[in-house]
Image (spheres, grey):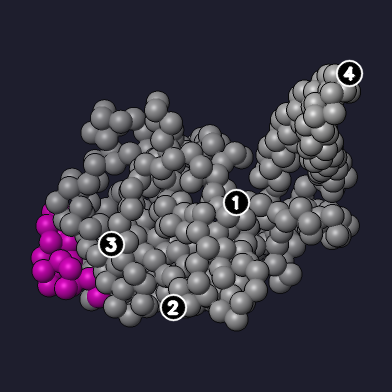
Amino acid sequence: MHDIRAIRENPAAFDAAMARRGVEAMSSAVLALDEKRRGAIHAAEEAQAEQNKASRAVGAAKASGDEAEFERLRALVAEKKAEVADMQARGKTLDAELTEMLMALPNHLHDDVPDGADEEDNVELRRWGTPREFDFAPKEHYELAAVRDGLDFETAAKLSGSRFVVMSGAVARLHRALAQFMLELHIEEHGLTETWTPVLVREEMMYGTGQLPKFGEDSYRTTNGWWLVPTAEVTLTNIVNGLTVEEGYLPRRYVAHTQCFRSEAGSAGKDTAGMLRQHQFEKVEMVSITHPDASMDEHARMTRCAETVLERLGLAYRTMVLCSGDTGFGMLKTHDIEVWLPGQNAYREISSCSVAGDFQARRMNARMKPAGGGKPVFLHTLNGSGLAVGRCLIAVLENGQQADGSVTLPDALQPFIGGKTRITADGDLA
């Protein structure tokens, strides 16, 4: 959420920041509502002062025996009391309207985010590895003989509908091994703290990280008001919701492996084959809570954590800086890491690592108390996939496929699959 004081001080800069997001100039509307809110608050304060003054005078009039003045002042106290209540209620209503307006506006962008309309205008930052050359036409993951029995979309459709999968045997074990490998790497080498969190959250937690109010249709809500998390970003970031922490508490770096749930609203007909875009999937999510001065360095660090997963698995990738038109609603800057999928002959996103600045912290009222004293300041938050487990499974299967339908597995996974090195064309680990 945006700082109303910053908008008051420089409305032109705020409008320019929103223009980069494709949002029309909003400062006039925001400031007009803010002025009404402040006016109601000021009127309530003035009425309260007059009520207090009249209340003090009531006793004096009573003591002097001036019944007429006593009755006049008593009526004035009642009148001002009603006026105070009315103005306070109006101020509260206007404050809620202002908050709702500000919550619907996207974060501003970092200065070095390139301008652009969509993903076609994203800028490549670097790439690692060389896509494997095949002496046969590579297949997509769901076409491989090795996973014929391990990826069951028909049974999943019977159980739950489209965009679900039932995994079994070697494929299920490989999927689990990938998550375990990622967790161990992030915990042992990258210094992240393993965390287990719920997948059902209160509505205010979704507001805190920016999924609400704008993107409610992208997530699932239970009949009693809980929301299913679209990613552990929601729970991990909201650990500091409402807190003021000491500077020495920072940075906090979390990692969690969770189920994730997305309705995929607006993606009808897109990536419907296989398990690239599912309603239920797993991610190993990274979240950092940092000092405001450290967040951009932390963003580079988090990106490297995600890239390292792919390098250890021997998977070619490229890292992109998202342009203004493709950067997420609540993010200051985002790096997308795209892994090479030979079955699609394309790089596809497997991780987004983003820095939100103080945007989420303002929504959560999460602050830091400076070590040297002074007024508490808002924290900075970051999140990133480290990685999306299902998409990583796809990449391992497609890049390791052999002409006979079997799949050779990365050496880094052997400790997590009993030393096995491949999935045979019959679907067995060997």
Mark 1 surroundings: few (<14), some (14-19) or many (≥20) residues within 10 A: many
Q: CA distance from mark 3 to mark 4?
A: 81 Å
Query: Residue 129: which numbered mark, if any?
Result: 2
In-image side of 327 versus 354 (left or right) = right
Judging by the rendered image, the residue that carries numbered circle 1 is 363
Horizontal and vertical percent for residue 139?
35, 55
Q: Quadrant of residue 43?
A: top right
Q: Amino acid at mark 1?
A: Arg
Q: Earlier in the sequence, mark 4 or mark 2?
A: 4
Q: Nearer the viewer, mark 3 or mark 1?
A: 1
Residue 117 seen from this side? no
Q: Residue type at mark 4?
A: Ala
Q: Earlier in the sequence, mark 4 or mark 1?
A: 4
Please tell me whether mark 3 sits on a helix, a strand or a loop.
helix
Helix, strand or loop at label 1? It is helix
Q: Residue shown at 80%/23% (left/top)?
A: 74
Which labelled disc corresponds to residue 68?
4
Q: Which circle marks residue 198 in the picture?
A: none
**Which residue is label 3 attached to?**
179
Q: Which residues are magenta?
A: 412-430
The span from disc 3 to disc 1 (Cα, nearest Å) is 31 Å
Question: What percent of the width, then of the height, locates residue 104?
Answer: 67, 43
Q: Is residue 201 visible?
A: yes
- Residue shown at 56%/79% (left/top)? 371
